[in-house]
Image (cartoon, rainbow, N blue to C red):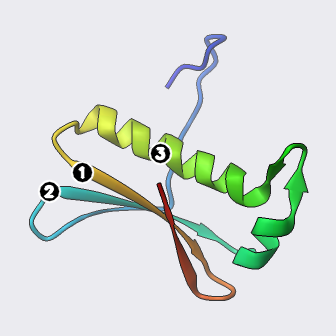
Amino acid sequence: IHGSHGEVKIHRPDRVMLSKDGRRLIVVDYKFAKLETACEQKLGEETQLQKYEAQVSDYMGLMKEMMPEKEVTGFLWFIKDNRVYQVK
């Protein structure tokens, strides 16, 4: 994918799954921070969680472009505390 300045940007979600009925794509990105930490940690004006959400949202948008007939959902899986967070 080419960025706004012509540079090549690589997007690589950790996992993309297709539902059994074939109608839905599920994008999962693994995070090794705790969910609570990601909610609290600020990076500039955004929290780490907001940055993670934007990343998965980008992946979801790319999947929708490639397969517009599929419903796409996205999740962050916080491995350390085994919590799953749905990205909307």
Q: Earlier in the sequence, mark 2 or mark 1?
A: 2
Image coords of residue 74 (percent x, y): 43, 59
| Residue on which disc 1 sits | 71
Q: Earlier in the sequence, mark 2 or mark 3?
A: 2
User: What is the CA distance from the residue labelled 2 to the residue labelled 1?
Assistant: 6 Å
User: What is the CA distance from the residue labelled 2 to the residue labelled 3?
Assistant: 17 Å
Most distant residue in the top direction: 5
**Amino acid on which disc 1 is placed:** Glu
Judge whether 24 appears above or below 20 on screen.
above
Question: Please, what secondary structure does the residue beneath circle 3 have?
Answer: helix
Which of the pair 24/17 is nearer the observer? 24
Image coords of residue 57 (percent x, y): 51, 46
Disc 1: CA contacts within 10 A as few (<14), some (14-19) or many (>=20): some
Any mark on residue 23, and which? 2
Most distant residue in the bottom direction: 81
User: What is the CA distance from the residue labelled 1 to the residue labelled 3?
Assistant: 13 Å
Disc 2: CA contacts within 10 A as few (<14), some (14-19) or many (>=20): few
Most distant residue in the left direction: 21
